[in-house]
Amino acid sequence: MLPRTLFNSDHDEFRRMVRRFIEQEISPHHERWEEQQHIDREVWNRAGELGLLCMTIPEEYGGLGVDRTYSTVLMEEQSYAGATGPGFAVHSDIVANYIYNFGTEAQKQEWLPKMASGEAVGAVAMTEPGTGSDLQSITARAVKEGDEYVINGSKIFITNGYLSDIVVVVVKTGDSGVGANDLSLVLVETSREGFSKARPLKKVGMKAQDTCELYFDNVRVPCSNLLGEQEGLGFKQLMKELAWERLIIAILSVATAQGAFDTTLAYTQDRKVFGKSVATYQNTRFKLAEMKTEIAVGQQFVDRCIELMLRGELSQEAAAAAKLWTSELVCRVVDEGVQLHGGYGYMLEYPIAKAWIDSRAGRIYGGTNEIMKEIIARGF
């Protein structure tokens, strides 16, 4: 298939280091993490020691100052290995970006070095129990009292929520009647009185990734915790980062599809039926050929989107299309992989079965695929 042109020898060396980290520090513990529904806190510190957190943040704030192709490598290697537990992408490529792009110098100095080292785990709290993808309808509110905000409400489906130390919370700060103008982003330290976390939610898949509900009961934070120069900028801030967030889902999806293809190819080559390997049958070869072709098409589109993103030219429509196509693609690929595994494809000790249940969420989070179609259609 077509060669990839995004990476150079430095990326290749970095990829080898990431692969060793996953093989030694993540894969041996992943099954246990699935049982406890979150990864061990120490893994965050180890990732920080190796420079794997907040890599795109400038060195003055503890990062490496590299571009997002390095984040791409880390996300791909996690996906190839089926390591869905560590929420590194949310922490490093979403939460840290909000703080770096919209925070004050004091906020950056306070949190980014801690996030880069793994001392502090970051989460972003958007979704509420009754709102789903409709961010403009959120009810969590921050009311100003003197030099403090008093926050009340709840958030659900929060990745890294259970282990979080700092949360970027989407709250309503105005009553203009225009939802987009009433939202703000506020930093909330999880040690604040009135802040609480529920146990990790019992999900169908991605069980090692801590995902929980957060509660705010008269949580008081200083007004200096507001992200941005004034209230009401939250929706615009979210929109500026959403294209990259959706591209992250596309990167993870196509890499998961590639990992599923690789494990399926290996299984069919080794498994024998009626005296010969499953891979020698025409139906198997044709199915594998279809899978490989679809993945190649998806990979080229995602790589092109990454190139545009690096130049600051990635549109919301293109990011939505990438998320839509690849999250549907990975579900087709893993489902075919399960079928080619036969009965063993339904057994959780086989990577294809875990990929099958883990990948389904990609069509929901980051905005459902129905929302992606709406965004794409606005460009007509």
Image (cartoon, rainbow, N blue to C red):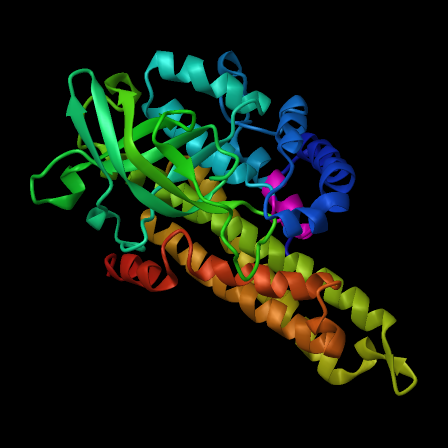
Left or right? Give the position of 376 relative to 159. Answer: left
Residue 84 forms part of the magenta stretch:
yes
Q: Nearer the viewer, residue 87 or 57?
A: 87
Left or right? Give the position of 137 relative to 10. Answer: left
**Which residue: 33% across, 64% down?**
370
Q: Nearer the viewer, residue 201 or 29?
A: 201
Q: Quadrant of the N terminus?
A: bottom right
The picture quadrant where one finds residue 379 is bottom left
The picture quadrant where one finds residue 281 is bottom right
Left or right? Give the position of 47 relative to 184. Answer: right
Is residue 117 at least partly visible in the picture?
yes
Question: Against 250, is 96 above or below?
Answer: above
Q: Quadrant of the C terminus?
A: bottom left
Residue 278 spot, x, y in % from top left: 81, 79
Residue 369 spot, x, y in % from top left: 38, 62
Question: Against 30, is 235 above or below?
Answer: above
Question: Against 246, is 182 above or below?
Answer: above
Residue 295 spot, x, y in % from top left: 59, 62
In the rendered image, the residue lying farthest to the left is 176
From the image, give the main secondary structure of the stretch colored magenta.
Answer: helix
In the rendered image, the residue lying farthest to the bottom is 274
Looking at the rendering, the stretch of residues picked out in magenta corresponds to: 73-85
Residue 13 forms part of the magenta stretch:
no
**Which residue: 63% across, 55% down?**
2
Total count of labels: 0
**Which residue: 40% across, 57% down?**
321
Residue 77 spot, x, y in % from top left: 66, 44
Is residue 226 at least partly visible in the picture?
no
